Image (cartoon, helix red, strand yellow):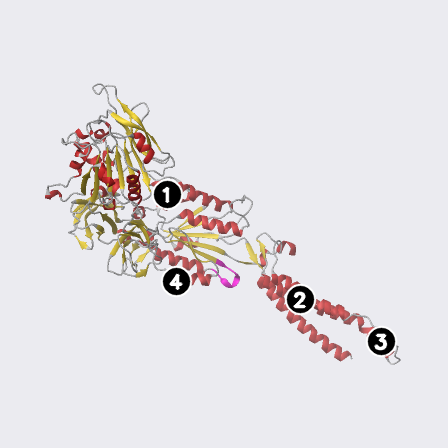
Amino acid sequence: MLAAVFEGFVHPALVAGVALAAVPLIIHLLNRQRHKPMPWAAMRFVLAAYKKTRRRARFENLILLLLRMAAVALLALAIARPFVGKDDVLSGLTETRRDMVVILDASASTGWREGTRSVFETIVARARELVLELDGSRGDRVRVLVAAGAPRLLSWRSPEEALDVLGALRDPSDEVLDLAAAFAEVASYAEEQAGTSQTKDASGDSSDIEVRLLSDLQKRDFLPSTGAGENHDGDARLFDALDRLKKLGIKVRVEDLGARELVPSNLAIADVAVPENEIAVDVPIEVDVRVANWGSAAAAGVRVALEVDGERRPAKLVDVSARGSTNEVFPIVFHQAGAHSLVARLESDRLGIDDARASVIAVPPPLSVLLVDGAPASDVAEDEVGYLAAVLAPLEDDALGGSPFETRVIEPGALRDENLALDGYDMIWLANVDALSDAVVERLEKRVAAGAGLIVSLGDQVQAEVYDRRLYRADGSGLLPAELGGRVAVRSRRDSYFRAQEFDAQHPALAFFADEKWRPLFSEVPIYEFIAARPLPGARVIARLDDDAKSPLLIEKSFDRGRVLLWTTTIDVGWTRLPESPRTLVPLVHEMARYVGRPHGAVRNVAVGRSLELEVPFFPRSPVIVRPDGARAGLAGEPLPAGPNLWRLPRIDDAAHVGLYRVEFADGAAQPYAVQLDPRESDLERLPHAELANLHPALMPVSSAASERKNEPEQRAPQGELWRWLAIAALTALVAETLWSAWIGRSRSVRS
């Protein structure tokens, strides 16, 4: 029976106790050493009396020895705290020890308030109730896991420690709940306790861990792919973690502590969008604020306001249908280049975190464009760059604001002039330039690598073999994204022409033509001649022609910090009718110039918990982060040069809460960035208990009502401890040994 109790269990106290229990026996054996008898006449009377009482003395000493050994052994066993299974013969003497994991849903949705108390406060209060049911003196253990974007283990030992941790929790996080990650964390712990791992078959193992999930039962947490356009990766991760728990015989008791309504009311700012390709100094744009109503009833007269760089604009009233959304437009004009902040606000409701949404947009200065005219002509209709200059020229209409472009036209020979500072241009367009010298190519490579854009459009002046020799490299280290071949032309311009048969409508340079209404403006433009090109493996073909070879028309390549676009035909009327279609030429040239000329990678709007890197056009001294609540913290690390007059700040990881942040510098300058809530977190629709019960066998829904929780079957660990009984037995043995020793001493003194 003892073998069953201690099977697979070795404790240092047990080993020491066994050794100590043998001490009385060793002393007894040492005292039995035989000595050489010495005859003595007077001893015969003593020996006669000893023989008469020897049997009784041996029996008394044996009992005393056994009591001493039992006291030491039982004390050691009590310290070792052995346990037995529920089916063991000693199970009736055991005291159950509980091992519990409490998962607290700390996602942003638990900030929803009913009255003065938030769901998260209810969750924390319920967690305290569960922990108070445990008894640390009998060995109960509890792990408190706070689950949001990533699970955080706050306590992993005694109930007393857990209560201290729970007392410090005040508010939920601003993150979305990753339930799959939380269950995977519990599964790993349970597998460790059961002696299994993820790579082993756990079908024969089980765990005695109680798992409680305290949640608002937000539907999208349990069914991640319910939203339109979402993939099923979240489902796979969630069910994989639940399968692992099921193999261990663990049922997760999901306590519903959310709102009473299945679809709680909630209004939210879902998005603050601007037409990025239209942003420029003194150019009017429209800010599109989307208001979402996640409740089951329509909302009328919702007040929406917009703050621009801290200045509040007049509010507007909108009506939003149930489970619908509406957009409100705010016209604005930025008179200075740089980063500007937008904050859209609603009147506060029960979930305050989504009643405001911040966004930061970068307003660039006018794009400086250098046009290199490879085939100048007196007639603008025949000039290679004449059309480009006309399209990019400043607008004269003050009502439309300024132009986003500043252009300069030069001839190819001017590129050889070292006094021409290429650093002053954001984008360079080589239009039908015959050839370039090695020195010019080297200067172009340096400028594009620093972040400028380069567009190469071909034509009848281009010497393809020179381009291939000086601008193309098979390893991708050259400027050209493709190796040029020979000219390809239609047999007769009267009978046929080439068209852009397919193009990437999602690409920023061609996104204007994504709408079916505007698509023919690009796909139906006649092209009579082009230069064949073989793209590099890493290049991106954005548009292809409809010839037999499906030849590339527009190819893109990244070159260090800059971009290169190759247009395999011309911009003039020599090879294409493109210039004769202003509705095609204007948006195409504008979007291509903006795409390659503007710096990329300068992200200023991030999700909660994500990091970002900011670049500033000056050396940043003593940067300090100012959080939405006004708290300040220094930014550790050193800035690094990122290009001409451009510095990159150390990575910023301070994005734990939604809102508008600022990075301030010693000279008083400031750079804003925004941390945005996942708009799906505003959907508070809850998962019905019946649907939850059918979702997976490892999930067991539990009502939030206390009266119903009392009727739940007790979930106890299938093991128990004997230490209290062993301690009592050890104390009994010590008392019996003391009394027996005193009785022996008294009786022997009387007999003597």
Relative to 705, is 200 on the left or the right? right
Query: Is tag 3's residue or tag 4's residue first in the polypeptide sequence?
Result: 3
Quadrant assignment, res 536: top left
Q: Amino acid at mark 2?
A: Leu
C-alpha distance separating marks 3 and 2: 35 Å
Q: Dividing the image into 4 quarters, which one contains the N terminus?
A: bottom right
> Measured from the top left, where is residue 407 in percent x and y?
18, 41
Q: Residues within 10 Å of mark 1 (few under 14, many from 20)?
A: some
Type of the residue with mark 3: Leu
Label 4, residues with CA under 10 Å away: few <14, some 14-19, many ≥20: few
Q: In the rendered image, which residue does mark 1 sit on? A: 224
Q: CA distance from mark 3 to mark 4?
A: 77 Å
Q: Secondary structure at mark 3?
A: helix
User: Vertical placement of 287 versus 372: above or below?
Assistant: below
Q: Could you say where residue 232 lies in the image, as x and y percent from the top left?
A: 39, 39
> Looking at the rendering, in which quadrant would you find the C terminus?
bottom right
Identify residue for label 4. Answer: 167
Image coordinates of residue 200 in percent, x first then y, are 54, 44
Task: Name the amino acid type tagged 1.
Answer: Pro
| Total numbered labels | 4
- Residue position marked by numbered label 2 in the rendering: 20
Please report whichever mark, 2 or 4, sits nearer to the chain's N-terminal start.
Answer: 2
Q: Residue at x 17, y 44 (%)?
A: 285
